[in-house]
Amino acid sequence: MPDIIILIIILAIFFEISNGWNDSANAIATVVSTRVLTPVKAVLLAGSMNVLGALMFTAVAKTIGKGIVDPNAVRDIVIVSALIAGFLWNAAMTRLGLPVSASHALIGSLIGAAMAFGGFGILNIAGLKKIFTALLASPILGIFVGYYFMKLILKLFGKFPPGAVNRNFGRLQILSSSFMAFSHGSNDAQKVMGIITLALFSKGMIPSIEVPVWVILICAFSMGLGTAFGGWRVIKTLGVN
């Protein structure tokens, strides 16, 4: 295996660890701040569900591998630059206790590095339109769905004793946190899978943008390792501040 590919894999592992380190806190901040679970149990829950989610799918990885830049035109230095920039951003924001999107960081870093290397022509404009539509729509849709779902819950359970409601919804928080961690692993881990796959394709080590099993395993367990670090500052920001 070429040295540059080994370097890319190492950088990808560090990025995936920083991803789990920061974004996992989003899934467990509420169950920790409301004392439904202890921090250690919450981190173990998030870590296991992140790994499980990362092992399930590869569609997003394929989009990252060929939907942002032309895989036939990209070079190693582009991928190295994108991973370093994304990792530094994630690490800095986690250090400051600020929840950020690793997806935004990695996609933005890859676009910037690709443009610096080959200009606009290296970008896959059609793929970027789909990606940016999803990135922009997600928080907006989340606001509306959260608002109306909360209204529905208040209408259905508003007349019940607060103590009973809190106990039952506390248990449901475990389920919702598990689902969030699983969806985080199934989506975010794939982005780094796509980056590694893109690097392998650019070196002619694989015939097409299909994610090798060993890449899936590396990314899944790297994200789980990052989750084990907990991102305690981010948990405090989301759950308390």
Image (tube, grey):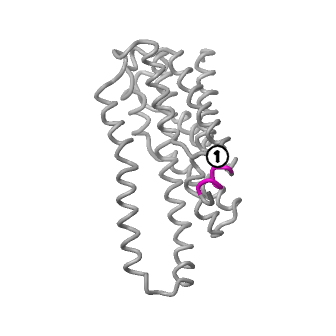
| Front residue of this view, candidates 193 and 153 | 153
| Number of numbered markers | 1
Element under disc 1: loop
Query: What x and y, as percent, mark residue 125?
Result: 30, 25
- Packing grade of label 1 (10 A; few <14, some 14-19, many >=20) is some
Farthest residue toward the left? 126
Query: What x and y, as percent, mark residue 25?
Result: 60, 52
Query: What x and y, as percent, mark residue 169?
Result: 52, 74
Left/right of residue 144 with respect to residue 11 in the rendered view = left
Query: What x and y, as percent, mark residue 24?
Result: 58, 50
Residue drawn at the location 63% of the way across and 70% of the way down: 36
Q: Is residue 149 magenta?
A: no
In the image, the segment drawn in magenta is 233-238
Residue position for label 1: 97
Question: In the picture shown, does residue 215 fall above or below 25?
Answer: above
Amino acid type assigned to the residue bearing label 1 in the image: Gly
Q: Quadrant of residue 123?
A: top left
Assign the N terminus to one quadrant of the image: top right
Farthest residue toward the top? 118
Assign the C terminus to one quadrant of the image: bottom right
Question: In the picture shown, does residue 153 fall above or below 9?
Answer: below
Residue drawn at the location 38% of the way across and 80% of the way down: 156
Question: In the picture shown, does residue 217 fall above or below 199?
Answer: below
Q: Quadrant of residue 215?
A: top right
Residue drawn at the location 50% of the way across and 21% of the way down: 199
Q: Quadrant of residue 39?
A: bottom right
| Front residue of this view, candidates 76 and 88 | 88
> Dominant secondary structure of the magenta stretch?
helix
